[in-house]
Amino acid sequence: MRHIALVLATAIVLAALAAAAAETAAPPVKIAVFPFELEDFSAGAAYVPPDDIDREQLRLSTEEARRLIAASGRYQLIDVSAVNDEAAKAGKLRECDGCDARIAAGLGADQSMIGIVTRITRTEYAVTYRIRDARSGALVDVKQTDLRMGANVAWSRGARWLIERRLLEQ
């Protein structure tokens, strides 16, 4: 009987500690994940503009990143679909010196994230993400894959690798 009481007391203490830890866990970070953008440094960039396939692959890369980030439980996605900023509409957030942070702050986010697919050649690319603090605009994290995995159909794989192996493993 004494043994059962000891086991029950231990279980109650452990349950109370677990409940207290759950209550003090940090709330998820509110993050505005903007659509991935293409930065084309390939020799053909001046002659072959981004096409519907490139745009679709950027969309798929964005969706994959958002899906993984939301599923982690560490982040709460903030909807960016109604953003009316010219740099965002033009797909040029990577060139606006941190204006993504200002936009994210206006949406109530804690952080902003932009993803960039850099086309080096028609079959080589790298994927980068930049995360900024929405209040200060300061860079919080920047990571790049340096993976050269083939044509544009592989961009979402690069985005997945980067989010899983860099952002979410931190």
Image (cartoon, rainbow, N blue to C red):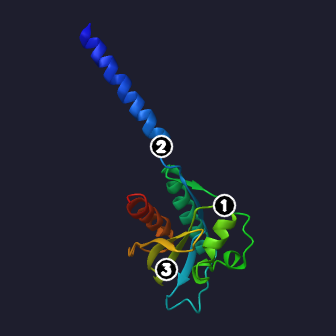
Residue 50 figure quarter: bottom right
- Report the residue marked by disc 1: 108
Foreground mark, 2 or 1, reads 2
Which element type, helix, strand or loop, lies under badge 3? Answer: strand
- Report the residue marked by disc 2: 24
Residue 46 location, x and y as percent?
58, 92
Residue 141 location, x and y as percent?
45, 70
Q: CA distance from mark 2 to mark 1?
A: 22 Å
- Report the residue marked by disc 3: 118
First reached walking from the N terminus: tag 1 or tag 3: 1
The N terminus - image quarter: top left
Amino acid identity at mark 3: Thr
Residue 106 location, x and y as percent?
69, 66
> Residue drawn 59% across and 87% down?
48
> Residue drawn 49% across and 39% down?
23
Q: CA distance from mark 1 to mark 3?
A: 29 Å
Is residue 108 shown left or right of residue 66?
right
Foreground mark, 3 or 2, reads 2
